[in-house]
Image (cartoon, rainbow, N blue to C red):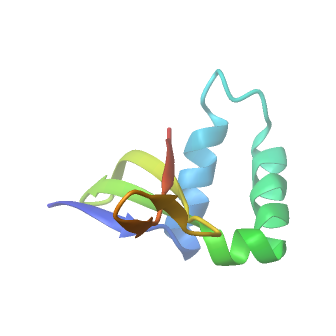
């Protein structure tokens, strides 16, 4: 069954490992884990960054990062939240 899951625990480890194998990444597996851990130690990272995985049973098909806004963006008709998504 295909689904989108919040990547946490072992699933997050698998997502990070898969990202490290990407030829355009340029970071070792160790460096990828260190980068993610450092981002999550910041207040911004803990509150605003979240990893998701598109899975088919136990296979990871894709992953994405959600970067939640830290303020409302004013537009005509009221305030709107703007989300940023980065995909691998």
Is 66 rendered above or below residue 62? below
Is 47 rendered above or below residue 70? below
Indicate the position of residue 73 as horizontal and vertical percent values: 54, 61
Indicate the position of residue 57 as horizontal and vertical percent values: 24, 60
Is 22 rendered above or below residue 30? above
Judged left or right of residue 36, residue 4 is left
The quarter of the image holding the N terminus is bottom left
Q: Residue at x 75, y 58 (%)?
A: 36
Is 14 rendered above or below residue 20? below
Q: Residue at x 60, y 29 (%)?
A: 22
Q: Residue at x 84, y 56 (%)?
A: 34
Q: Which residue appears farthest toward the top when viewing the image?
A: 23
Q: Nearer the viewer, residue 57 or 27?
A: 27
Indicate the position of residue 61 as horizontal and vertical percent values: 34, 44
Judged left or right of residue 19, residue 32 is right
Q: Nearer the viewer, residue 80 or 49?
A: 80
Quarter of image, res 38: bottom right
User: Total of numbered circles in the picture?
Assistant: 0
Q: Which residue appears farthest toward the left when viewing the image?
A: 1
Q: Nearer the viewer, residue 18 or 52?
A: 52
Indicate the position of residue 39 as horizontal and vertical percent values: 79, 62
């Amino acid at each position: 069954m295909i689904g989108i899951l919040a990547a946490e625990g072992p699933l997050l480890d698998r997502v990070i490992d898969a990202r490290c194998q990407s030829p355009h990444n340029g970071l070792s597996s160790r460096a990828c884990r260190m980068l993610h851990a450092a981002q999550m130690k910041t207040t911004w990272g803990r509150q605003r960054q979240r990893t998701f995985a598109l899975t088919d049973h136990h296979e990871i098909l894709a992953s994405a990062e959600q970067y939640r806004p830290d303020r409302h963006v004013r537009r005509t008709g009221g305030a709107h939240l703007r989300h940023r998504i980065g995909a691998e």
